[in-house]
Amino acid sequence: MSKDFSGKVALITGAARGIGAGVARGFVAQGGRVALLGLEPELLTELSDELGDSAAWWEADVRDGQAVKNAVDAAAAHFGRIDFVLANAGIASYGTVRQIDDSAFERVVDININGVFRTLKYATQYLEKTKGYALVVASQASFAALAGLAPYNASKAGAEMLALAYKQEVAYLGIGVGVCHPSWIDTDIVRVAEADLPSFAAVRKKLPFPANATTNIEVCIDLILRGFAKRKARVYVRKSVLISNWTKPLMNSPVVWPYLRKLAGNTVPQMEKEVDALGRYHHAHTPVTKPAE
């Protein structure tokens, strides 16, 4: 199917790097224009300059509802419309439930669930006018839990359910909604996490397919843009992630529990030691801006 986005505008959160920046480039290459939202003004400026008049950017923390509203309203005014939304802003953390700092856990949940809520809430009025489409970036982690990623698993499962409820709410407005489930994507976030925590890299290799697979970012971008063009209900990155959805009951069953218990028992103690030695609970590139009081 053609991915011609001529005359269309996509609003992308978490647009400064990784998946967000890649989708922005791909969308513009197919004739569209992009509103870039994020927290790293230098990177947003570079990307916007690269894309020329087809792009504009706004600094906005998705934890701050007023900032999100202001940015979405400004983007709609600047471009005259919003046809697509990619609710992509998201972070992960390091550490087990007993170990992680309260604020680090809360930050993951606030960005990955509440940030999606705020993005959808303030974009809805513009998507209604264009009968547009929103794609929420959840994860393969929506289907399968992994020790050491509790806040990420919880928030991505929550993001999926938020998107599915929102889909029902806005269907009568003519708005389409999809959920994207990437596996491990070859971005700096995954690479730095493996460098920070060797035990994380080791446990990934022991996971069953497709939970152990890594996808290059170009494939991810292409599948997301295809999802836009087809207004897909689900975008699996790669398509084999569909297996994780189908087998979710099995992965949470007594049949698989002995394997997961053994795997966690062999890796969690070392992972906790590595996090303690690291002295932080987030990726080194995670912006630390706090929302306005």
Image (cartoon, grey):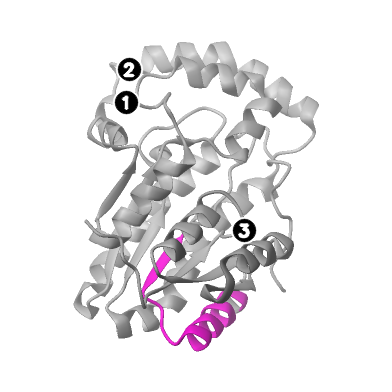
Name the element at disc 3: loop
> Crowding near pointer 1: few (<14 within 10 Å), some, many (20+)?
some
Q: Is residue 264 left or right of residue 286?
A: left
Specify the quadrant that holds the N terminus: bottom left
> Circles 1 and 2: CB distance less than 8 Å?
yes
Q: Where in the figure is residue 178, as x and y percent of width and height?
A: 30, 58
Main SS, magenta region, reads helix
What SS does tag 1 mark?
A: helix
Drawn side of residue 9 relative to residue 131, left or right:
right
**Residue at image coords 44%, 57%:** 26
Quadrant for the C terminus, please. bottom right
For the residue marked with disc 2, what is the amino acid?
Answer: Val
- Residue of label 2: 256
Residue ID at (54%, 13%): 265
The relative height of residue 195 versus residue 50 in the rendered view (above or below) is above
Look at mark 3 in the image and give the residue it sits on.
16
Q: Is residue 40 visible?
A: yes
Asked if the magenta segment contains residue 81, the reply would be: yes
Q: Which residues are magenta?
A: 67-87
Which marked residue is nearer to the observer: mark 3 or mark 1? Answer: 3
Instruction: Using the numbered discs, state the Cα–Cα distance from disc 2 to disc 3 in whole angstroms.
Output: 39 Å
Could one spot residue 89 in this view of the protein?
no
Disc on res. 115: none
Distance of label 3 from label 1 (alpha carbons): 35 Å
Residue indicated by mark 1: 251
Q: Is 264 positioned to the left or the right of 243 in the image?
A: right
In front: label 2 or label 3? 3
91 or 24: which is nearer to us? 24
Circle 1: residue type? Met
The mark nearer the N terminus, 3 or 1, is 3
From this view, report whether residue 63 is shown above or below residue 253.
below
